[in-house]
Amino acid sequence: MTVEYTERGMLKYSEKLLERFRNPKHIGEMENPTVVAEEGDPQCGDMFRLYLKIEDDRIVDAKFLSFGCAANIATGDMTVELVKGKTVAEAERLQIKEIADALGGLPLIKMHCAVLSYKTLKKALAEYRKSRAGSVSPPQG
Amino acid sequence: MRVYLDNGTTTPVAPEVVEAMLPYFTEKFGHPVFPYSLGQEAADAVERAQEIIARSINARPEEVVFTSGATQANDMAIRGVAYANRNRGRHLITTKVENPSVLRVCERLEKEGFRVDYLPVDAEGFVDTAELEKRLSDETILVSVANVNDEIGTIEPVEEIGEILRERQRKIYFHVNAAAGYGRVEVDVKKIGADLVSLSAHKIHGPKGVGALYVAEGTPIEPVYFGYISLFNLRPGTENIPGIVGFGRAVELMMENFERDVAHMTRLRDRLISGFEEIPHTLINGPRGKKRSPANVSCSFKGLEGESMMLHLDLNGISVATGSACSTTKLEPSHVLTAIGLKAAVAHGTIRFTLSRYNTEEEIDYTLSVVPRVVEQLRRISPVKPEQL
């Protein structure tokens, strides 16, 4: 992975990232999601909301909303793409680096954007696990 | 359509300026310190530029020193005067809304044992002059305030500040960074009562890499750069002759067309402002009317993030600047927007549109057709609702 960060104060985005920013495939609201999770704070300049529709432990649909920069939108879109169609267990194994790599790298200063969508995904999946644990098989013992 | 609305960052060089510069690259390329004819030609060109620039600010030619730009002029002025006056006191006053090229120098001086006060501003960005009077002490040696705020276009009361400083028994030097104001408002060093004024060429359709510092005769100032002394002992090194010639020509054009250009930019500015005011949940930052730079429109669109907005406008051919943290490597919202009391979440959605004499009514029509559409598009994909901010 290439981390492009220069002391010139410039932010150099990869072509892949810019293409995702211009034409995100998974952005928008979702009706009747299984779980919704949100991370970030507009005061800090970025906020991310993730919707997952899960059937039989498989993510059959995913969408997101973003208040943030180009990297926020692009990493959000890539995160959704990487988990859509996967099982919950598979999605739980997603790494931050995979998100950045799939975008052709992220400027170091924008790595927190990948972290934000990753954290939101983790939160959504944890919530899903919790709701399942409560309704299906209560813990033994 | 390509629309350049980031003239506060830099401007295109006027064709007349390029034409004036060209001979100084290949034919009149001499070094100005040597008395042979090629050298004299270069020295004469520098003198002519000094005369033009001096006239534009009501100064004398010998009081104009060429620099690499306003950033260097600010550094030379602030550190130079601080060092030369350190025995009279070690206190400086500036404001919270200065350009980083002033603030970083002040922070450096603080590390060297100087004390610096940063004056607050009101919600429109005006410096609190009552607070200035309170902070002046027997230790104060220099006050530095820009005549126009480069982010939100506030025209600061520099004449009033000059007056306050003149009334003191003790001489307090006054530096004005006029990089954002030159060509937008009148800069008269006598009316302001300024001892030092920083100017930049590339913000008035001159070339990049050249600026000037006005130093009033008799101002104690130490050089902060050392090396081969050329025409100016404050700024050693071979002068950027083509740049200086271009700067001079740019100032000539600026002065010839000043009133017409200001009226033109003011008309376009007010069209943009009234257009943006119709977009819901939108704030115009800075004052309205005569106390605002004719070239500046700063606008916060609530519920969206500035970098995304900037890049979407770029996709539509429009170049603008943003006050969003995400466009810099610091990830903090602009210090100016914070100083006028904007919430960080709102500051992040700020776009700065800056005009020049070359912008047209058609470009403004186009911009006013694109901006509301992009704002709506970005608000639609945002989890933050503008009415919550």
Image (cartoon, rainbow, N blue to C red):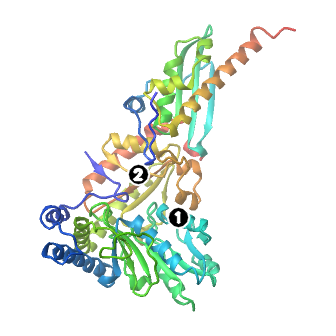
Front one among B304 and A103: A103
What x and y, as percent, mark residue B349?
Answer: 50, 48
Front one among B216 and B150: B216
Image quarter hosting the N terminus of chain B: top left
Residue A36 vs B12, above or below: the answer is: above
User: Mark 2 is on which residue type?
Assistant: Ala
User: Mark 1 is on which residue type?
Assistant: Leu
Q: Is residue B191 visible?
A: yes
Residue at horizontal 44%, vertical 69%? B74
What x and y, as percent, mark residue A15?
Answer: 37, 31
Secondary element type, mark 2: strand
> What residue is disc 1 on?
B103
Residue B307 vs A139, above or below: the answer is: below
Q: Is residue A53 left or right of residue B27?
A: right
Binning the other alpha carbons within 10 Å of mark 2 as few (below 14), some (14 to 19) or many (20 upward) gives: many
- Of tags 1 and 2, the one toward the viewer is 1
Q: Is residue B27 left or right of residue B353?
A: left
Front one among B6 and A37: B6
Front one among A127 and B179: B179
Residue at horizontal 53%, vertical 87%? B171
> What residue is disc 2 on?
B321
